[in-house]
Amino acid sequence: MRREIECFPKAAFETGGAQIFTGKGLCGAFPRFVDELTGGGRVLLVADGDGIDLARTLGEEGKRAGLRMTVKGAAEVCDAEENCLAVVGAGGAEAAAAAVAAARSRRAECVLFPSVPCEDGLLAEGGVKAVCLDENVLSRAPKDAKAAAAGLLFALPVKRFEDVCAEKVFAPEGERRETTLLDCGSSATELAVNVLRSGADGRTYAPDVTAEVLRLLALSAGKRPRRRGEYVFVAACALAAFYKAYLSSPAIDTLLPADHDAALDEFARLTGGERGNILQAFDIFGASGYFRINYILGEYRMDLIAELASCDLGGAGRRWRRMYDDAGFWMKSAFTSEDVMHAMALAGEKTGGLLGFAAGTGFLAAMRAGGNRAERREDAVA
């Protein structure tokens, strides 16, 4: 049975195996929290770019309280040799991931103290004892960090559609999955809490894979990557439009299969890894593959289109863009429509569901080829 920390307010709830503490002024009580957790042992504080100011504050509070604390950057923590009884991640997702890994390697307790609304999936792999959400800290988070967190929640209707599609078409006899829709709440803390809850089960959807490919494409082009939640929402909007076009197309049976070998080369180039068997295994020509799925899609096509129509991504997009000072104008320099289509096509090689099936049938490849021809004609006219 978990022992409550006496100097902290009672945990608001528990998710992903971690106790979630919420309130204001938790920074001041944090040294006592850690001291009681470790019994006076050494503490390793891990910070990233989002947590520089927070790490400085926690370090000063810890020093005044007499804690034995070592501060490391997220990029250098793997090389640190300090033994410790607790590892604290201060900042964003990078600090959280580094803290979890450091705590696991040292068999220490892990505590997260986010300075920005959390990303989903932080608690999916376990290993975190507590997450401390201080409204005084989170309310000062940059606007793009809050928008990225909101983007993760705004993308949930598309993930719910993928659950429905999986239940009806791709795994009719398998375990039913259902995404819980959550709003942004009225405070930075509620936003962070709902994002944590949304990804506690660790499931991965097509918007998540597409977002990762968008990040890799930005890096390969020498651009500064945006926050993951921003990519996820952009990917969700693009996928919703694509799914509607695919389900409405009367000619999906006439396409040639995609060139999976070229996609394999592209992934190896983007990731800097070796060329290997990293594609989604999907035998579209097997008796239980292509023909079965295509038949079931035909039966549920109108139901799935109606499910997509219930996703108010237009309204969500307007709310999301207005969270930025430039009303989302930054997107014009962050990626192009071709980047998004390219990311969807590559993501289809690594994910199942409707996107994976569309990639396997060659629909995404044909769509990209058509878009490239149109762009070449425009360039020739210009």
Image (cartoon, helix red, strand yellow):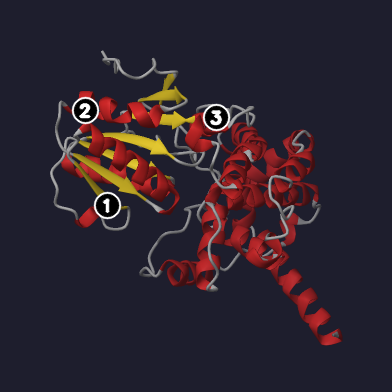
Residue occupied by mark 3: 194
Image location of residue 179, percent across then percent down: 58, 30
- Comparing 156 with 278, the one in front is 156
Three-letter code for the amino acid on which mark 1 is drawn: Lys
Image location of residue 100, percent across then percent down: 30, 41
| N-terminal label among 2 and 1 | 2
Label 2 residue SS: helix
Q: What crowding class fits label 3: few (fewer than 14 Cα within 10 Å), some (14-19), or many (20 or more)?
A: many
Residue occupied by mark 2: 35
Q: Nearer the viewer, mark 1 or mark 3?
A: 1
In the current view of this chain or complex, which residue is farthest to the front? 64
Label 3 residue SS: helix
In terms of image quadrants, where is residue 172? top right
- Comparing 78 with 309, the one in front is 78
Identify the residue at image location x=37%, y=68%: 273
- Comparing 64 with 335, the one in front is 64
Identify the residue at image location x=14%, y=48%: 82
Please say if 264 is above or below 32: below
Q: CA distance from mark 1 to mark 3?
A: 29 Å
Residue 96 seen in render: no
